[in-house]
Amino acid sequence: MSAAFRKALKSRQKNHHERSQLGFRKNLGLLEKKKDYKLRADDYQKKRRTLDALRKKALEKNPDEFYFKMISTKFQDGVHLMKQKSEEVTDEQLKIMRTQDIKYVEMKRVAEAKKIERLKSELHLLDTEEKPKNTHTFFCDSKKEVRNFDLAERLNTAPELLDRVYNRPTLETLHKQTIKGPTNAKVLKSLAKQRRHQYDLLNQRIERERKMFIITQKIQTRKDLMDKREKVKVKKETVNSPAVYKFKKQRKR
């Protein structure tokens, strides 16, 4: 084996690695390696070729040249935008489309109303002024027991808690939890916060259901206007109510 061939053997060659970033120089950023430079250089050359091609195209452009996109696009804020073609829809097709819109919005509104009823059944509207007036009937064996009837004793709770329709603990529970004063306060605070969140959610759903009902009315009004020709506007459309029209009475043939 010749000396030149031994020098050319890859097994005898030393691998040369690029040095890594030194610890005390990390604040200066990433140390660029050759592969990073290659990517940056390729990107720079690509952008340069693109700019040269555009510059050449602009120099060689014929000012009298016409192409059809001149009438189908518009220049807005430095960008060429395609002009939207107006949809050709007949009155019958538009009526069907609005009927489908009404059905979709009404379906969503009914689903929201069911969620509202479910939330109301869970909360029972206990904290509202118009809380339900429930009745609780107790049966006694004799008239003497009726005269001596004590509601607090019967419910096994404190007399101060009789007006509450929810979270009315018994005497045993009160005796047990008076020892754990701070824990009891935390539990009550957490329950009150959770209840307020539920009421906020209920108010949001009620407002959403009301808005969907208004949208349904507005779509229905627009659909009715396609059938009636002679109309008089009585009330303008607002955010919370649709427009009101008075139509001329016409006998159907």
Image: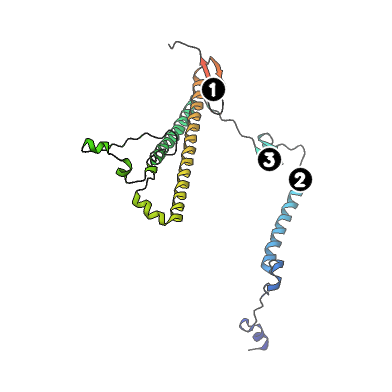
Q: In the picture, which quadrant includes the C terminus? A: top left
Q: Give the percent coordinates (x, y) of residue 89.
A: 53, 27
Q: Mark 3 sits on what residue?
A: 80
Q: Is residue 27 left or right of residue 115?
A: right
At 65% from the left edge and 35% from the top edge, which residue is drawn?
A: 72
Q: Give the percent coordinates (x, y) of residue 183.
A: 44, 55
At 32% from the left edge and 46% from the top edge, which residue is drawn?
A: 156
Which callout, 3 or 2, points at the residue further toward the start of the chain? Answer: 2
State the CA–CA distance, disc 3 to disc 2: 16 Å
Numbered mark located on residue 227 in the image: none
Residue type at numbered disc 1 = Ala
Q: Mark 1 sits on what residue?
A: 243
**Viewer-proximal residue among 90 and 155:** 155
Residue type at numbered disc 3 = His
Q: Secondary structure at mark 1?
A: loop
- Mark 1 or 3: in front is 1
Q: Mark 2 sits on what residue?
A: 58
Q: Farthest left residue?
A: 141
Which callout, 1 or 3, points at the residue further toward the start of the chain? Answer: 3
Question: Is residue 43 placed above or below 106 in the rendered structure?
Answer: below
**Viewer-proximal residue among 34 and 5:** 34
Q: Give the percent coordinates (x, y) of residue 77.
A: 71, 40
State the CA–CA distance, disc 1 to disc 3: 39 Å
Q: Secondary structure at mark 2?
A: helix
Residue type at numbered disc 2 = Ala
Q: Secondary structure at mark 3?
A: strand
Q: Give the percent coordinates (x, y) of residue 207.
A: 49, 35
At 65% from the left edge and 85% from the top edge, which residue is drawn?
A: 5
Mark 3 closeness class: few <14, some 14–19, many ≥20 residues within 10 Å: few
State the CA–CA distance, disc 2 to disc 1: 55 Å
